[in-house]
Every structure is written in structure tokens, then in C-alpha cells.
Image (cartoon, helix red, strand yellow):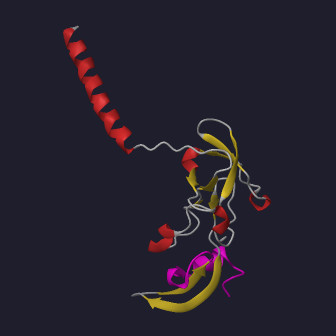
Amino acid sequence: MEKVKIIKERLKTTQSHQKSYLNVRRRDLEFKEDDWVFPKVSPMKGIMRLGKRGKLGPRYVGSYIIVQMIGQVVYKLEIPPEMSLVHPVFHVSMLKKVIGDPSLIVPVETIEANEELSYEEIPVAILDRQVRKLRNKEIASVKVLWRNQQVEDATCKAEGDMKKKYPHFVE
């Protein structure tokens, strides 16, 4: 019984140490009605790899107003009709507060997010074609410019893969 008591005391001290470390880094997010926030989105992982700069794609979209506070950490946003697939209720971890005047935010090209809050990158133009020679075969590749990306962010993809995914685009 004495050893069990010692073990419990040591567990409590360890837990209190861990809790104090966590509380230092934790920041409580709290929004009010009529606050402006950005909802979080992410690109679909299996659809397209956008190279090293793909990480720098948009993480948050739009700026929407909080209509209702449903719970302590759940908020309802006023979503425009073009995003009707997205459910208007968000957890606090999926929101980022708009700092500054929301009327001054310049709207970027609209990103069509689906119900999982993800979007698919769509090719805009083929910038270059080249054939890479290996020992026994040749691989045709194209340099593709994607929607919502700059010209510097264009990526090389195999021409065969592009023909399979986007047959109307690659000719």
C-alpha cells in the first residue's frame, strides 16, 4: 500500500509539471458575434502535389462574419451561396481572427471548397514541353501552371498522367 501511495504521488507531480508546461503555450481563442474570421481549408492530398511551394498555398479563405455563438467553442458563420456545400458551423480551431478592417481585404480568386473544406487545383496553362531521356526510355513531361499559383510555382508533370486526369486540357 505504501508503494502504491508513493507511485500515485509521483504521478500527480509529473502530471502537474506537464500541465504547467502545456498551459504556458496554450492560448484560448474566443470570438464574439459580429467578429470577422477566416475559415481554414486545405488542398486534397491525393489530387495534386504542387512541389516545395505547395505548402505556401492558401490555408484560410474569405472573411466571414460570425452570426451566432452556438457553444463555447462552436460558431455559425454567414456563408455566401457559392459555398453552399460547406456547413456553416465551425469549431474554434478551424477559425482565425481577421485583424484590421474586413472591408479593406481584397478578395482573391474564389476557391471552390467542398464539404470537407478542401479544394482541387486545376491546370490553367501548359508553359513548356520537354522529353527527358533515360537509359532505355524517354519520358515526356509538361510544365503546368495551376490556378491560384504564380508562374514561378509551375510544376513539371508527366504528360501521360496529365492526359489521364485532364484529357481535354493536354492535346
Using residue 141 as the reference point, say whether residue 4 is left or right of it.
left
Q: Which residues are magenta?
A: 147-171
Instruction: State the image coordinates of residue 62 (x, y, percent, origin top left).
Output: 65, 62
Q: Is residue 150 magenta?
A: yes
Q: Residue furthest front?
A: 101
User: How many marks can you see?
Assistant: 0
Q: Residue furthest right?
A: 81
Can residue 62 be seen? no
Image quadrant where one finds the C terminus? bottom right
The foreground one among 17 and 69 is 69
Instruction: State the image coordinates of residue 127 (x, y, percent, origin top left).
Output: 58, 89
Using residue 20 as the reference point, say whether residue 155 is left or right of it.
right
Q: Residue at x 32, y 39 (%)?
A: 21
Q: Residue at x 62, y 54 (%)?
A: 37
Kindly indicate the quadrant of the structure image that contains residue 102: bottom right
Using residue 31 as the reference point, say whether residue 51 is left or right of it.
left
The foreground one among 19 and 55 is 19
Residue 17, compared with residue 88, is above or below; it is above
Residue 133, compared with residue 93, is above or below; it is below
Kindly indicate the quadrant of the structure image that contains residue 58: bottom right
Q: Is residue 61 magenta?
A: no
The foreground one among 21 and 10 is 21
